[in-house]
Amino acid sequence: MKALGGFIDLDALHRPSSTAENLAVSPALHFAYGRNALLFALLQMKPKALHLPFYICDSVTIPPTQLGIPIKWYSIQSDFTPNLPQVEKDEMLLLVNYFGLLSTQITAYADIYQNQLIIDNTQAWYNTPNAKCWSFNSSRKFFGVPDGAQLFCPITFAPDVSLEANIPEYRHLLERSLGNEALAHQIFAASESQISCNLATISQLSAQILDSVPHDIYIQKRKQNFQQLHSLLAQHNTIAHLLEDIPYAPFMYPFLPKHKIKHQNLYALRIFAPILWNDCAHRKVNSFEFEKDLAQNIIPLPLDYRYTTDDMRDLVNRMNHLL
């Protein structure tokens, strides 16, 4: 049975032949990881506090904590938009573009907060950067590479930075490509815990792979697979109304079923849907019950370029008895 989901293995092994135009954008700065990019932005702005959505990975809290910047939590609404907090002139606001669903709203937020705003586009690689605010992404969420992130700076900011070279762990990509999934996941988990916030640039390996990605084909596959999953699961998805307009290049299909499904039951079916993010469900902060419930129950289903629409039908067929 084909495994569906989990981290993407070595990107080049899935690449279709194509003479199509490469749609890569030119970023302001290349970093090894998203947290490096965030750290750099905070170093430049030196805010007195950073407003973070409670529904977020703990890794995003590392840069402000390392710099001694207080974190102020805010909540999100059922459509993933923020309950906007009061942001003082010496503070910054980070907004997550969940599943790429908030791309159209970002312009309005950028108009309000401008360079006080940081957009976390780790789930929206192809979102067009807004020149008024900071934004960063993560190549590992979209491609089979060991590192890589892009930081886009406001037009008023001219960075001058020297970055150390990153030497990432990449054995998990090779082991998964060889079919050694258990070992690959073990290496992946161990390497994740060792990721540093040091200001490092993308590795040469990742840069070379990303330079030849056929973006147009990858975008089209994501859109087709998203549409296929939505056609099969919309009747069971309590947030289906948010997904009628397909994101430009969807990250995953956010599935919040009417009846809760345990992730362990999906893993038994070889569907490796991640938990986004278990961290916040166990964070020792009062309230934010909606976010904690969302982290436990939403099921992000894989739809990237490794899979065909037939794979999406197979995925739903495996899940049918759980719905």
Image (spheres, grey):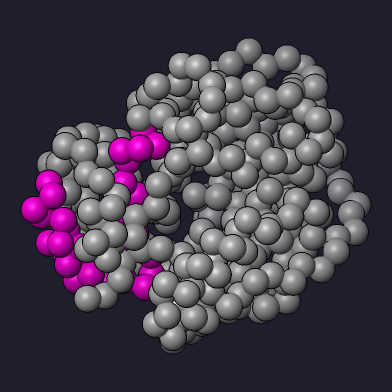
Q: Is residue 318 magenta?
A: yes
Of residues 113 and 136, the one nearer the viewer is 136
Q: Residue 79, percent across and down?
A: 36, 29
Of residues 27 and 12, the one nearer the viewer is 12
Q: Residue 265, percent across and down?
A: 23, 53
Q: Could one spot residue 202 in this view of the protein?
A: yes
Left or right, 182 with respect to 110, comes to left
Of residues 96 and 109, the one nearer the viewer is 96
What is the quadrant of residue 44 in the picture? top right
Left or right, 136 with respect to 243, comes to right
What is the quadrant of residue 117 in the picture? top right
Q: Residue 208, percent across and down?
A: 66, 79
- Number of labelled discs? 0
Main structural element of the magenta stretch: helix, strand or loop? helix
- Relative height, residue 66 to residue 161 (above, below): above
Q: Residue at x 25, y 56 (%)?
A: 266
Q: Residue at x 73, y 76 (%)?
A: 204
Q: Residue 11, percent across and down?
A: 51, 76
Q: Residue at x 49, y 49 (%)?
A: 123
Q: Quadrant of the N terminus?
A: bottom left
Magenta-drawn segment: 294-323
Q: Residue at x 16, y 37 (%)?
A: 259
Left or right, 67 with respect to 126, comes to right
Of residues 323 and 311, the one nearer the viewer is 323
Q: Is residue 231 magenta?
A: no
